Image (tube, grey):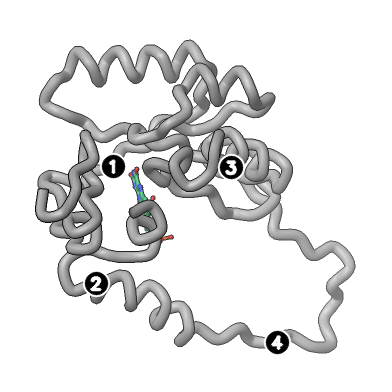
């Protein structure tokens, strides 16, 4: 169930496949006879110094892939010098991640109809020292993810045919 959740896409999975094929089409050009003494990918993202302009995108249910997954990912990101984004749909709580890491992380929000709940989530993220709020805007309705339906990945989990 959780393997399929990470390794699938919605509907015909065309975007999922394009995520691989589009990157394969990008070629890196080798630079030669240039001074490479001070080469660096270091940059800043929302005012924060980063070792390279890359961040860990929010990934729901990480704690179901591996115990304490969100904490481990946050620690790995800190070690690599890049930001970690905690998903609204995380297994480890905002406070649990904050208590077990020593770098501020970003918090992703799905804005739901129940605004009081969202306000309280944002307050909790502020109190936990989150350094940016990442708004996800593309989930007006849930995508049809066939493998998740067959696996019964829902809250609470269901057994097919559910
Ligand atoms: C398994 C999985 C879980 C995801 N969970 C979330 C989530 O909880 N919240 C969110 O905003 N985006 C979520 N995303 C979307 C990613 O954060 C990211 O925006 C998307 O995969 C596009 O980036 P990419 O092209 O680097 O994969 C998820 C993506 C995957 C593959």
Q: Is the Cβ of the residue at disc 1 closer than 8 Å to that at disc 4?
A: no
Number of residue marks: 4
Distance from the alpha carbon under mark 1 to that under mark 2: 20 Å
**Which quadrant holds residue 20?**
bottom left
**Which quadrant holds residue 148?**
bottom left
Distance from the alpha carbon under mark 3 to that under mark 2: 26 Å
Q: Could you say whether the residue bearing mark 3 is in a helix, strand or loop?
A: helix
Residue 51 placement (x, y as % from top left):
70, 50
List the residue tagged with mark 1: 136
Q: Cβ of disc 1 within 8 Å of ligand 1? A: yes
Q: Earlier in the sequence, mark 1 or mark 4?
A: 4
Front of the two marks 1 and 3: 3
Q: Which mark is residue 81?
A: none
Residue at image coords 15%, 49%: 142
Q: Is the Cβ of the residue at disc 1 closer than 8 Å to that at disc 3?
A: no
Q: Earlier in the sequence, mark 3 or mark 2?
A: 2
Q: Is the Cβ of the residue at disc 1 closer than 8 Å to that at disc 2?
A: no
Q: Could you say whether the residue bearing mark 1 is in a helix, strand or loop?
A: strand
Front of the two marks 3 and 4: 3
List the residue tagged with mark 2: 13
Left or right side of 34 for 53: left
Q: Earlier in the sequence, mark 1 or mark 2?
A: 2
Distance from the alpha carbon under mark 4 to that under mark 2: 33 Å
Q: Quadrant of the N terminus?
A: bottom left
Residue 45 placement (x, y as % from top left):
55, 43
Q: Nearer the viewer, residue 7 or 21?
A: 7
Q: Is the Cβ of the residue at disc 4 closer than 8 Å to that at disc 2?
A: no
List the residue tagged with mark 4: 30
Residue at image coords 66%, 37%: 75
Q: Which mark is residue 73?
A: 3
Counting other residues with Cα less than 10 Å from the Cα at mark 4, is it few (<14), some (14-19), or many (20 or more)? few
């Amino acid at each position: 169930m959780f393997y399929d959740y990470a390794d699938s896409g919605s509907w015909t999975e065309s975007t999922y496949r394009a995520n691989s094929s589009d990157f394969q089409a990008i070629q890196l050009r080798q630079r030669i006879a240039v001074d490479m003494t001070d080469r660096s990918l270091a940059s800043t993202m929302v005012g924060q110094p980063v070792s390279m302009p890359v961040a860990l995108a929010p990934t729901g249910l990480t704690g179901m892939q591996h115990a304490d997954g969100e904490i481990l990912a946050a620690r790995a990101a800190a070690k690599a010098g890049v930001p970690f984004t905690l998903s609204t749909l995380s297994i480890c709580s905002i406070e649990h991640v904050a208590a077990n890491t020593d770098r501020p992380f970003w918090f992703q929000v799905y804005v739901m109809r129940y605004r009081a709940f969202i306000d309280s989530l944002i307050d909790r993220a502020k109190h936990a020292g989150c350094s940016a709020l990442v708004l996800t805007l593309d989930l007006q309705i849930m995508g049809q993810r066939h493998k998740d339906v067959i696996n019964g990945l829902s809250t609470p989990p269901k057994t097919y045919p559910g």
